[in-house]
Image (cartoon, rainbow, N blue to C red):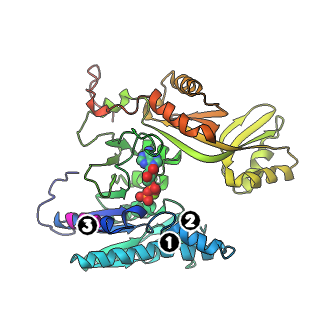
Amino acid sequence: MSVPGAFEPARGPRPIVVQKYGGTTVVDEAGREALARRVRERLDEGRDVVVVVSAMGRKGSPYATDTLIELVRNEGGAPPRDLDLVLSCGEIIAAVVVVARLFRHGMPAVALTGAQAGLVTDSTHGDARLLSLEPARVRAALARGLVPVVAGFQGVDESGEVTTLGRGGSDTTAAALGAALGAELVEIFTDVDGIKTADPRIVPDARTLPSVTYEEVFQMAHEGARVVHPRAVELAMRAGLPLLVRDARGEVPGTLVSRHPLGPKERPLWAGYRDVATGVTHRAPVALLRVPAGPGEEPRVFRAVADAGISIDLINIQPELKSFTVPEDRAEEAANALRREGFAVEVVPGCAKVSVVGSGIHGRPGVTAAIVEALVAAGVRILASTDSHVTVSCLVPRDDMERAVRALHAAFDLARDRDALQAMPEMEGREE
Ligand code: ADP
Ligand code: MG
C-alpha cells in the first residue's frame, strides 16, 4: 500500500499499523524471521507497529490450540471457564516467543495478554464478544519505543475471568486494536496469498482477489471462508479501517479489504460490477432438521431451538413442514428440545452448505438458475436453498461438497483474471 508521506520523518504521533500473524506464520524459524523482517520494514517507514499473534501451529504442534484442548480432554474435560484459561496460554506463549525474536533483531518489544491490552468481553467462555477496549498499555508501550506483541484470541470479562473469542478470534483482536488505536491499516498475515475466490484446498486454481469490499468479505467469512473472521470484518467496516490479507512469507500484495472495490491497480470502481460472483464458500458439517408442524405452530418450533441457544440457518417454512439447519454437533440437542415440545423431528446429518457470494448477485436474474444447473450437471443433490441480496446458498450432501464448490467456481468463471478486463465503456461516473 502506498501511503503519502511514508518516508517523511515522523512528526508527532507516528501512524500505526497492526500486524496479525496466524498460527502457521509463527510456528517455525522461517516464519518468525519473516515476521521480524516485516516489523522492521514498517518501523523503518516511520510507523509504529503493534503485533497480534495466534497460538503457534495447527493440530499436532505442541503449543497449538487443538493440542491444549486435547490435553484437557484426555483428562476428561474441564469447565468452559477453566478451558479458556488454558487456551489463552497458546497465544501468550507465541507472544513471548515473538518478543524474544524481535529483541534478537534489535527491536525492543513487550508481550501483553488480551487482558493487559485492555480487551474486555462478555462472559461467554469459548465464544466471547468484545464489550470494550481501552488499549492504554499498548499506547504506553509504543510511547516507550517498544513493539507491543498482543496475545490474540483472548480477553477478560468484567469479573476478571479470562475468556476466549472463538476460532479466528485473533483476527478480531487485531481489528479491534486497529480501530481503538486509530491505525491506518491492519495486516492479516496467513498461509495463503490473500482472499481467494474459493478455498484453495478445494479449488487449486482459485484466484487471489486484489480487492474486495467489507460486505463481500463479511459475507464470505460468514458463509465459511475462514481466512478472516466475520467479526473482524465487521469491526473494520465500522471503523473504516482497511484490512490487508496477505501471505506472511511471500511477496505478493495480498487482498485489500475496504469500502470500495478498488485494487492496487486502481481499476475503475465499476469494473467489479461486471462480475456476478466474487467467491464460492462452503461450511460443513451441518445437519438438516425437518419438523412436521402445522400452521400456527411455528413460534413453538423456533422458540424451542432458540431457547436451547442454538443458531439456525437455511430456514424454510411450509404449511405442514418446517425445516432448518444447525451445526452438526448441536443437532441432537436441537432435536431433543423439539421432542420435549411434542414435535416429531427428522435429523439429516452429513450435510454441507455451499454459497456463491457477490455484490453483483443483487437483482440479477438467472443466478439461481445458473447455480442449480451447475450443481445438477455435476451430479450434486440439492437438499435446500436460500438467498440474500449478496448470497445464494445450497445445502448438499457433505460427500458432494467439494464437487459442488468446484462446479460453482467453474460455472461463474472465477479462475479468470478479472484485472485483465477493461472498464465497461458504456458506464460513466462513479456510484458512491
Ligand atoms: P490463520 O491461522 O493464519 O488465521 P486460517 O486457517 O484461519 O489461518 O485461514 C487460512 C486458511 O483459510 C487457508 O489456508 C485456506 O485453506 C482457508 N480458506 C478458506 N476459504 C478461503 C478463501 N476464500 N480464500 C483464502 N483462504 C481460504
Ligand atoms: Mg484464522
Task: Give x and y (percent) for residue 398.
Answer: 62, 42
Task: Please tell me whether mark 2 sits on a helix, a strand or a loop.
Answer: loop
Task: Give x and y (percent) for residue 142.
Answer: 28, 75
Circles 1 and 3 in contact, beta carbons < 8 Å: no
| Residue at the image point whose x is 78% and y is 51% from the top | 304
Most foreground residue, 12 or 105: 105
Reading the image, the residue beneath label 2 is 128
- Count neighbours of disc 2 (C-alpha within 10 A) and say few if under 14, some if 14 to 19, many if 20 or more: many
Relative to 14, is 228 above or below?
above
Relative to 213, is 229 above or below?
below
Q: Amino acid at mark 2?
A: Ala
Task: Please tell me whether mark 1 sits on a helix, a strand or a loop.
Answer: strand
Side of 383 relative to 2 (left or right)? right
Circles 2 and 3 in contact, beta carbons < 8 Å: no
Q: Which residues are magenta?
A: 33-41
Residue 185, image quadrant: bottom left
Q: Residue furthest right?
A: 342
User: Mark 1 CB in 8 Å range of ligand 2?
Assistant: no
Reading the image, the residue beneath label 1 is 155
Circles 2 and 1 in contact, beta carbons < 8 Å: yes
| Residue at the image point whose x is 31% and y is 79% from the top | 100
Q: Residue furthest left?
A: 8
Reading the image, the residue beneath label 3 is 39
